[in-house]
Image (cartoon, grey):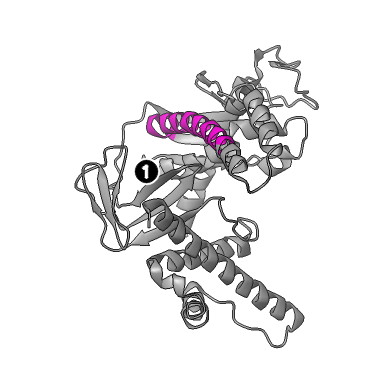
């Protein structure tokens, strides 16, 4: 059996375990709704694994051809997904489909060499990039994007305190420019999806003219998937550079709590908003601030950062999207719209920190 088939089989077992566990959880929820007086305890990851070993594995002997960690971690991830759903952090978990986001996780004896890594059951895997030496990964996740497989490690790293150039900065995210800082620095978005629209249109038209499931259809689908992977990689590269710069050089970073899902409902701006990656920007900032000993302050989404004058504090009643220069009718101050919002965000973040420190001092005195 080829290496690609082995990796695909591990991903298939993880996907099957996820779908079976999700179906069981749906049955438990439906029973509890129909019988409020006879509720069944919602299964944990351990309960799901015991049920899988007792009921699913005997009926599907191909489970024993892969590592036991693959279905275990799939059920663990399913349990975490339901915890996020019950906390109203994420939506309800969905069933997984073959060929979409194929991945699986392994742990145990993992050895990292110069340009190869040894994982349980599968054995040695060659890599195209040089791997770090002297690390002991706790687990690794193998995932597929188009025709390539990627491996990521979970390791413990010490938190290093990097010297900060600025104490506090406000970040205003936008469509015209990706991020405008209160210090005056502007980061332009690459708009990778917009640049690749003509190529995507041609590839999608070529795919639609093939018979679904045929060899030519698979080739066309692979070309389309590779094009989307390139778009995502370009966007992710820019976001990583910007968020790394912010977390390493600023002690406190203030951003707005944007309603991204609500903004995407605007059919005129949805494509441009999705091309910027606002959610990914915040997600990267959250974990990089912890790594670089910075603090992320999220202000209220209803704070009038764009309508408020950063000079005198006057708030406008109406500010259209066409007005790129903010003009204050009270003091006559003129400034770029995005820079004005970024300065106000930094002020809001500073006031939130002061109030939080005040509450902490009051609690300690009480």
Q: Residue at x 30, y 61 (%)?
A: 120
Instruction: Say whether residue 304 is visible.
Output: no
Please count the marks in the image: 1
Is 11 drawn above or below residue 21 in the view shown? above
Q: Position of residue 329 (x, y in %)?
A: 76, 15
Residue 220 in the image, given as x and y percentages of width and height: 60, 37
Specify the quadrant of the image occupied by residue 111. Answer: bottom left
In the depicted structure, whether residue 83 falls above or below residue 170: below
Q: Which residue appears farthest toward the bottom when viewing the image?
A: 38
Which secondary structure class fits the magenta region best?
A: helix
Is residue 35 depicted above or below 62 in this figure? below
Dividing the picture into quarters, in which one does residue 108 lie?
Answer: bottom left
Q: Quadrant of the N terminus?
A: bottom left
Direction from residue 106 to residue 273 in the image, left or right: right
Q: Is residue 215 visible?
A: yes
Nearer to me, 162 or 70? 70
Q: Position of residue 291 (x, y in %)?
A: 37, 43
Foreground of the two, 317 or 153:
153
Residue at disc 1, secondary structure: helix
Q: Residue furthest left?
A: 134
**Residue at position x 26%, y 54% from top?**
118
Residue 245 within the segment the image draws in magenta: yes
Q: Using the image as rendered, state which of residue 104 and residue 83 is in the foreground.
A: 104
Point out residue 285 in the picture as x, y percentages from the top left corner: 48, 39
Q: Is residue 82 magenta?
A: no
Q: How would you rate the neighbour count of disc 1 (Cα within 10 Å): few for under 14, some for 14-19, many for 20 or more?
A: some
- In the picture, measured across the screen, residue 233 lies left or right of residue 338, that is left
Identify which residue is drawn at 53% across, 35% down.
226
Bounds of the magenta segment = 223-251
Tag 1 residue: 291
């Amino acid at each position: 059996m080829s290496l690609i088939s082995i990796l695909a089989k591990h991903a298939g077992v993880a996907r099957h375990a996820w779908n079976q566990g999700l179906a069981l959880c749906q049955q438990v929820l439906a029973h509890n709704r129909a019988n409020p007086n006879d509720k069944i305890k919602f299964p944990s990851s351990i309960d799901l694994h015991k049920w899988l070993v007792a009921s699913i594995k005997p009926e599907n002997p191909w489970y024993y051809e892969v590592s036991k960690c693959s279905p275990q971690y799939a059920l663990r991830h399913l349990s975490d997904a339901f915890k996020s759903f019950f906390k109203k952090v994420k939506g309800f978990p969905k069933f997984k489909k073959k060929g979409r986001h194929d991945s699986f996780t392994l742990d145990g004896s993992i050895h990292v060499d110069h340009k190869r890594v040894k994982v349980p059951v599968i054995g040695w895997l060659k890599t195209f990039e040089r791997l770090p030496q002297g690390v002991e990964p706790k687990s690794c996740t193998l995932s597929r994007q188009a025709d390539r497989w990627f491996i990521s490690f979970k390791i413990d790293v010490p938190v290093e305190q990097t010297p900060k150039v600025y104490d506090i900065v406000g970040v205003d995210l936008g469509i015209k420019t990706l991020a405008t800082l209160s210090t005056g620095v502007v980061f332009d978005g690459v708009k990778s999806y917009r640049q690749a629209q003509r190529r995507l249109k041609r590839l999608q038209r070529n795919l639609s003219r093939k018979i679904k499931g045929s060899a030519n259809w698979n080739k066309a689908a692979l070309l389309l998937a590779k094009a989307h992977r390139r778009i995502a990689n370009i966007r992710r590269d820019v976001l990583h550079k910007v968020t790394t710069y912010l977390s390493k050089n600023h002690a406190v970073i203030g951003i707005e709590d944007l309603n991204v899902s609500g903004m995407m409902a605007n059919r005129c701006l949805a494509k441009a908003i999705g091309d910027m990656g606002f959610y990914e920007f915040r997600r990267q900032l959250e974990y990089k601030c912890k790594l670089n000993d910075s603090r992320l302050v999220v202000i209220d989404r209803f704070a009038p950062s764009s309508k408020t004058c950063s000079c005198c504090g006057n708030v406008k009643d109406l500010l259209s999207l066409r007005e790129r220069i903010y003009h204050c009718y009270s003091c006559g101050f003129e400034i770029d719209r995005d820079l004005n919002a970024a300065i106000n965000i930094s002020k809001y973040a500073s006031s939130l920190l002061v109030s939080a420190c005040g509450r902490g001092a009051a609690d300690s005195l009480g």
